[in-house]
């Protein structure tokens, strides 16, 4: 038996989107009362039919419902989970607690899964179910679905909510997939600023947090940061990557990229109600506070604050990045440029916030797992091999999807052979390490339920440029490196991938840290490496470092912090 409902009321769905979730729990409560069950939950299936998302849960007796009912149920890999039977039969499934049977909710003796369908092209597609749980043994009276009109009205309301939720899930997942594709395209096209869009997105979110913006506003800001330069895919490769000064004609072409970015963003996000103003944010990220920007020459309050946030984030990351025709600016000069252009190019309030954040380079950005899309590498350990996959981590509705950029690397992937999984996520200047729990692998996509941060060694993020030299062990030739994090026991550095192939793992190496006041020679070995775009990042751990050298490293870090604070006071005065 199954419940099939006419839920083609798209007008109802749109008009009720802001209030229906509050009503949903009350509806679940009424269903529990009619049927005398202790738990009622509304579960939505994803397109791959391997996870169920709890959109709402009512529990009769317990206050903390989250502790007993999961937000996400990964059921495909568990043959005993009755959700698999529901998918197969598309009919009501009952389950009574036996030792070998899988229960969805702890302490439940009797379970019922009522399928919910959505009519699509004259067929009924299973999109989710209503879950009922009881702490005592009871049998579900199927005939009541034919007899009780109120019950069918309540189920119909839940069905409409799940239809709305499915629409949003598909829209967001499709949009994230397309954003992932476009951000990779722009990384391939703009060689000067690899990973630039992710850096800008992270800066946007940092500023948004300082401003106290809501989670929804932060999400829009992050996406605007990812998409701000996406229009460059429409511009000639040679113009984007020109190492010298642009001609007036070329500059006019470049100035069109915000309009192209806006158009592409509308196609990606314009149909998603919560995100439909992102294209407008993107369009005006090159407007200036004094009205001398482009494409529309707007000024002051005529421009959204969010556009100004993307603009200052874009400028700061460009100043802090090495290019073919110029080196990255020292951090004190970046601060000088921000103050020099305060109230002209940049919004005055945002300059103060950005400088405050630049002066706190040692602080880790703790909100990285809340990002919609993060640049990451998945490290999969087998018994005798390691597979490193570069890709994007997507945060969608309380679960994570990891999509590798090179799908050919996982064509023969077998989850059962995996011994350990670790993930490295890149933000502005740092790599964050996580222990990962993979729940399923399907359609070249990793489904992840849990990421636990792995504490890093005592190192500090560096937003200023710190160079070093790595000495190749065979012939002692020098390899220039860019140090991203450094501390008393280790540092992390980046080099271009074509050079990285020569660097050995686990062998004794010598390095030199090129501080401004003096150089420090260090011995050690490389323990890990990660690919991010055209660069490879390595963790270098010191061996037998004397205390005086460790003190010299920290002295330089503290000196830099003092220098930055003095610079800020000087520019403010």
Image: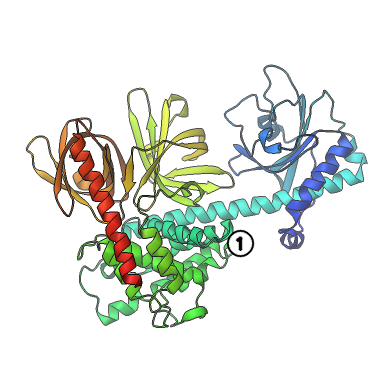
Residue 243 drawn above or below residue 527: below
Left or right: 351 in relation to 276: left
Residue at the extreme left: 475
Q: Residue at x 45, y 81 (%)?
A: 296
Density class for disc 1 (Cα within 10 Å; few <14, some 14-19, many ≥20) is some
User: Which residue does the image show at 77% across and 24% down from the upper left?
Assistant: 109
Q: Which residue occupies the extreme top position in the image?
A: 99
Q: Is residue 494 left or right of residue 160?
A: left
Image quarter where the C terminus lies is bottom left
Residue corresponding to mark 1: 274
Q: Secondary structure at mark 1?
A: helix
Percent position of residue 41, x then y: 74, 39
Q: Is residue 195 visible?
A: yes
Look at the picture and state if 214 lies above or below 382: below
Question: Relative to 51, is 120 above or below?
Answer: below
Is the N terminus in the top left, top right, bottom left or bottom right quadrant?
top right
């Amino acid at each position: 038996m199954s419940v099939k409902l006419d839920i083609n009321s798209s007008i109802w769905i749109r008009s009720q989107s802001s209030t229906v979730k509050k009503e949903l729990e009350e509806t679940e409560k009424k269903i529990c009362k009619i049927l005398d069950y202790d738990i009622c939950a509304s579960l939505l299936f994803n397109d791959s039919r391997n996870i169920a998302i709890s959109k709402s849960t009512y529990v009769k007796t317990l206050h903390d419902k989250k502790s007993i009912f999961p937000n996400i149920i990964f059921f495909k890999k568990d043959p005993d989970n009755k959700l698999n039977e529901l998918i197969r039969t598309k009919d009501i499934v009952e389950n009574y607690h036996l030792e070998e049977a899988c229960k969805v909710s702890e302490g439940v003796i009797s379970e019922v899964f009522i399928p919910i369908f959505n009519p699509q092209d004259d067929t009924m597609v299973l999109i989710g179910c209503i879950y009922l749980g009881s702490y005592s043994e009871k049998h579900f009276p199927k005939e009541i679905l034919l007899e009780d009109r109120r019950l069918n009205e309540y189920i119909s309301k839940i069905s409409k909510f799940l239809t709305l939720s499915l629409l949003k899930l598909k829209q967001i997942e499709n949009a994230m997939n397309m954003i992932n594709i476009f951000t990779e395209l722009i990384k391939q096209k703009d060689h000067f600023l690899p990973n630039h869009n992710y850096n800008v997105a992270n800066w946007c979110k940092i500023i948004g947090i300082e401003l106290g913006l809501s989670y929804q506003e932060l999400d829009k800001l992050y996406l605007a940061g990812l998409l701000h330069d996406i229009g460059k895919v429409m511009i000639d490769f040679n113009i984007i990557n020109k190492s010298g000064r642009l001609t007036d004609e070329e500059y006019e072409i470049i100035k069109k990229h915000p309009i192209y970015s806006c158009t592409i963003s509308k196609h990606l996000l314009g149909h998603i109600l919560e995100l439909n103003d992102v294209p407008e944010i993107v369009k005006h990220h090159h407007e200036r506070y004094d009205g001398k920007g482009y494409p529309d020459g707007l000024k002051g309050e005529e421009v959204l604050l969010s556009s100004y946030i993307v603009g200052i984030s874009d400028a700061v990351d460009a100043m802090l990045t090495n290019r073919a025709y110029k080196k990255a600016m020292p951090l004190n000069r970046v601060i000088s440029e921000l103050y020099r252009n305060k109230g002209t190019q940049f919004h005055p309030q945002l300059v103060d916030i950005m400088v405050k954040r630049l002066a706190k380079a040692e602080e880790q950005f703790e909100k990285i797992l809340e990002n919609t899309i993060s640049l990451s590498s998945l490290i999969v350990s087998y018994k005798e091999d390691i597979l490193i996959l570069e890709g994007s981590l997507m945060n969608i509705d309380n679960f994570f999807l990891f999509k590798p950029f090179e799908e050919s690397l996982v064509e023969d992937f077998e989850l059962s052979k995996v011994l350990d999984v670790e993930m490295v996520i890149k933000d502005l200047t740092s790599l964050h390490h996580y222990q990962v729990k993979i729940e399923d692998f399907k359609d070249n996509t990793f489904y992840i339920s849990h990421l636990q941060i792995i504490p890093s060694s005592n190192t500090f993020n560096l937003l200023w440029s710190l160079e070093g030299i790595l000495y190749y062990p065979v012939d002692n030739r020098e390899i220039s490196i860019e140090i991203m994090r450094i501390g008393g026991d280790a540092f992390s550095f980046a080099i271009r991938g074509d050079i990285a192939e020569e660097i050995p793992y686990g062998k004794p190496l010598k390095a030199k840290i090129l501080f401004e006041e003096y150089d420090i020679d260090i011995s050690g070995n490389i323990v890990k490496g990660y690919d991010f775009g055209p660069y490879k990042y390595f963790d270098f751990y010191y061996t037998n470092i004397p205390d005086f050298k460790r003190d010299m490293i920290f002295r330089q870090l503290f000196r830099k912090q003092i220098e930055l604070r003095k610079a800020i006071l000087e520019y403010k005065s």
